[in-house]
Amino acid sequence: MSYSSYIALIPILPLAGFVLLGLFGRKYLKNASGIIGTGLLLVAAVLALYTAYHYFFVDGKVGDQYQSITAFKFTWLSFSDNVSIDMGIVLDPISVMMLVVVTFVSLMVHIFSLGYMKGEERFSTYYAFLGLFTFSMLGLVVSGNLFQVYMFWELVGVSSYLLIGYYYDKPSAVAASKKAFIVTRFADLGFLIGILVLAYYGGTLDIGTLIQKLTQQQSAEFLAISTASLFGVSALSWGLCLVFMGGAGKSAMFPLHIWLPDAMEGPTPVSALIHAATMVVAGVYLVARLFPLFTLTQASLTVVTYVGLVSALIAAVIACTQTDIKRVLAYSTMSQIGYMMFALGVSGYGGENGLGYTASMFHLFTHAFFKSLLFLCAGAVIHLVHSNEMKDMGGLRKFMPVTNICFLIACLAIAGVPPLAGFFSKEEILLAAYNSNKLVYGEALFTSGLTAFYMFRLYFSIFWNKQKDFHHHNDHGEGTMSMKIPLIILALCSAGAGFIHFGEFVSSDGKALESQFDPVFSAAPVLFGLAGIMLAWVMYKRETDKPQKVAASLGGLYRAAYHKFYIDEVYLFFTKKIIFNLIGRPAAWIDRNVVDGLVNASANITADISAMIKGLQSGKVQAYALYFFGGIVTLAVVFLYWWK
Amino acid sequence: MLNDFLILMKQELLVTVIIFLLLFKKVSGREWSNVSLMNFVNVLLVINLVSGFFMQQTGTLFGDMFRSSELLSFEKNLLSLGTLIISLQSYNWLKDHKHVAEFYMLLLSTLLGMFFMLSSNNLLMFYLGLELSTIPLAALANFDLDKKKSSEAAFKMIISSAFSSGLLLFGISLLYGTTGTLSFGEIPAHISGTPLQVFSFILLFAGFGFKISAVPFHLWTADVYEGAPVAVTSYLSVISKGAILFVMVSVLYNVFTPLSGTWYNMVFLISLLTIITGNLFALRQENIKRFLAFSSIAQVGFILIGISGQSVDGTASVIYFVLIYIFSNLAAFGVVNLVSALTGKENIDDYRAFYKTNPLLSWVLAIALFSLAGVPPTAGFFGKFFLFLAGAAKGNYLFIAIAALNMIISFYYYLRIIKAMFMDANDRPIPKLETSFSPKASLFICVAGIVVTGLASGGYAYIHSLLK
């Protein structure tokens, strides 16, 4: 079966779900909406798996290299022979992998929501939005054209806005969705300019052609883009850094991460979908997609590395101090995405040098499973306790055995304990970092210790510690089967996904990459991880006053981390004090006095002109004729004597 | 022989419809109600439009006086489509009118005139077509028979057109005098750029300028647009202008090629004058009909930018824009026509809180205005985009920049109406309007046109392919 016969169905099925449920859901399909949405996605997920099988094992490989296949394409708008906006589906190792990840995680979230969102007033709207989001995300990952990427990128932003603001009667949810939208929009501005810079010099919007043109060192396009410069930085670096800015916004990289913790106001399964496995990794995916271009300039790779590294560390530190379980997970996501970013940043192109690239994609793949599992477990916990705060939880292992085990597996996976999935991918990242930059390696190692600590802090506080007096509703207990099944499936994936020989399928140049497993090397990260777990065990296994003591002894650092290093406040200071006072107020003054004045003046002038013409139009057609003739004479004088 | 008939087929069809109208009422021998007559004509117009797509014979006739090509057929189909839309929109206005058959006879005669004008390959033929398309229009402007303003409009129109035609003829005779031929094919070889030829060109250009109401030849527009019935105003500002623009592009590009330097400057100058004046006028109109009329003057200025491109892209962008302009402007006129016919309200202030009572119509008007303003992703955006692209190819960026600035100014006045409809409060909004099938169908066609041309790029590519 050729791709073209079914591939378009993968994104179209969720879209159909959106249209169907959006139009008829509330009136006619109220209770069936969940089943319909889930069913459509199930088909899409099966098709995606089949595509992956077909691509990786049947016809993706030519020689020893995976090829990029254009499965489907049509021209939407053509500007010239070279520049056109195409819509299409491009299959290559990473897009196929993303197809599987997105449809699979989305399917799990769909199933989980059947129980979690049951009885919601806008149940069908919720599923319609999920469908729209899945469609946009799928459209994004299969794009072969920069403009298609941008369009779906924005669509992802819009649909996540709708999902985060799903509880629209809750002011904090509305504020959060607005914040997420505005911050990412701001980043997208950079993205758009970056696209235009690349397309201008490359003369095409097609990613494949662009890469092909620019990676030839002698090509006219490459010379043009690398010699043109602004402030001493080449146009290529500018373009890539601006594109990366868009990616950093979506992926919540420092300093554009401020929207992510607030976005936890949305329904928890939504966070599992958007903030664990799909939208937030779009930035990583984007860098990976344009990776051959990034390797052309060291400057842009350095930016990627350090932004990723700083994000990973800061987020891990903040995560240690947060008390809202979803916010801990949000910062943990940010930290893990930081890992993926700097793994790309330290990577080179081709062969052994491309280890970082493979590692980054591998981590993206495994992270999707354990992080969405963590979010879904958190959802199950919140479902039971009706609170997001750690202090309201404790001793839950007796009430929710399945969730307990699943959460533990996910925690072990993210902490990098062998042989769970996170161990393998993190290990590869650390190896790539070690090979390229010892400083990056050291920091990454420290962060992995922190990761283990805060994850187990979370785990012990929720499931061990002292049982709290929460309003326990025995009526739904641990949740319905539809909530447990996705947890179990994801737990199995989190446990087993690491055994895939990822390097064989995904590498920077499409050729298989041998994974180098070295027990000696992996001893250090594992030890760091175990140390973090032990520390958490000591501090949070039982209720003690140790955490308070530690917090007190850390003093300022703890407070700073607790307040997320005051980054939100810095933004507020900038927007409120500086932008409003220094730019907003003068702009308002200019608007009132100069612009309004000009508009009024133009209105007055118009009034005068029209009064003049009114005067001439007193029913005298002769006057018209006069002006008509006057026009001809003027034109004749101008063009015969003056402006030949 | 059969081939000759096919070349003329579009015109023949139209003549048939006119003759049919003239005789039918008498011959059928029974009283026809206005509504059934209108429905009948609308069906004929649909047949005329649809069959137009099938008979696209290329060739010349009458000793090279008349030509037909795929492109011309396409242009004629556009005009037929616009006429059909206007006919559908006139429903509420015409259903109590005493002279429905005459209205259609005059309307279709002007359309026939435009067809001949488009197909002309000779200045004489062109002139005949032009007059045939103008004189019945003056009669149509007078069609609100009991309104004094309507008669005034008709009177002013016929006098002004006579004047402009006189000068146009003068230009034609000067051109004949210096080149010795009237055929479009032969004139270019004889143009050497002598002052007399330039002057004759200016006269011809002024004639075109008058018809498309380019500044400073636009003065008649204000009175005529205001006085004439809404249907006639929309016909004048969309169909009639569209036809002239098609001919103008072809004449400027193919006949006055040797003078291209001169006419580029002239188009550039007139374009800026027209955009700025049109904008300044539209900015302060309170009457929505006058507002649309003036904003359409500014739109013509933008079309002139495309013409100034002097390339295949120029022609394609003009035709593409006219296509979009037909949909957008007629959608706006359609709503205005409906409100005016059913409630008599024509002021922008009356449209406050229109959304509360008529959400669907508000959306139609809003989409139309967005498209006219050129807000992406409506069709109007792409239309203006291609016009600017064609104009920018000449490298006169200052010109394009000023025009783009004016486009932004125009956002202001289009959005003013949208604001009134959606955001302002009103104690006595326009009541919920009950519409009949025909106006609804016309609005549906328009909105579908705006949306489809905006989202699918095939249109522009198709027009481009016709030009090769």
Image (tube, grey):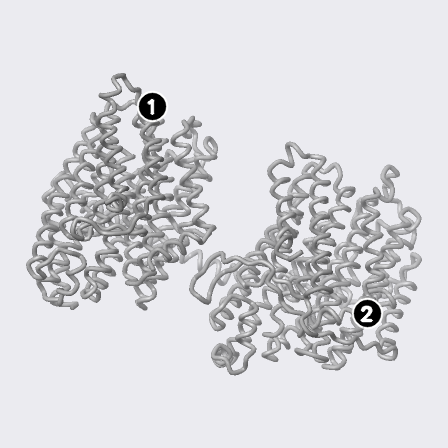
* Residue A31 in the image, given as x and y percentages of width and height: 72, 35
- Residue drawn at point x = 9 percent, y = 57 percent: B176
Q: Quadrant of residue A499?
A: bottom right
Asked if residue B420 shows in the view, the reply is: yes
**Chain of residue at mark 1:** B
What is the quadrant of the C terminus of chain B in the image? Answer: bottom left
Secondary structure beneath dot 1 equals helix
- What is the three-letter code of the residue carrying label 2? Phe
Secondary structure beneath dot 2 equals helix
- What is the three-letter code of the residue carrying label 1? Val
The residue that label 1 is drawn on is B35
Asked if residue B419 shows in the view, the reply is: no
| Alpha-carbon span between mark 1 and mark 2 | 79 Å
* Residue A11 in the image, given as x and y percentages of width and height: 63, 52
The residue that label 2 is drawn on is A424
Q: Observer-nearest residue: B363 or A598?
A: B363
- Residue drawn at point x = 43 percent, y = 32 percent: B426
Q: Is residue B433 above or below residue A492?
A: above
**Chain of residue at mark 2:** A
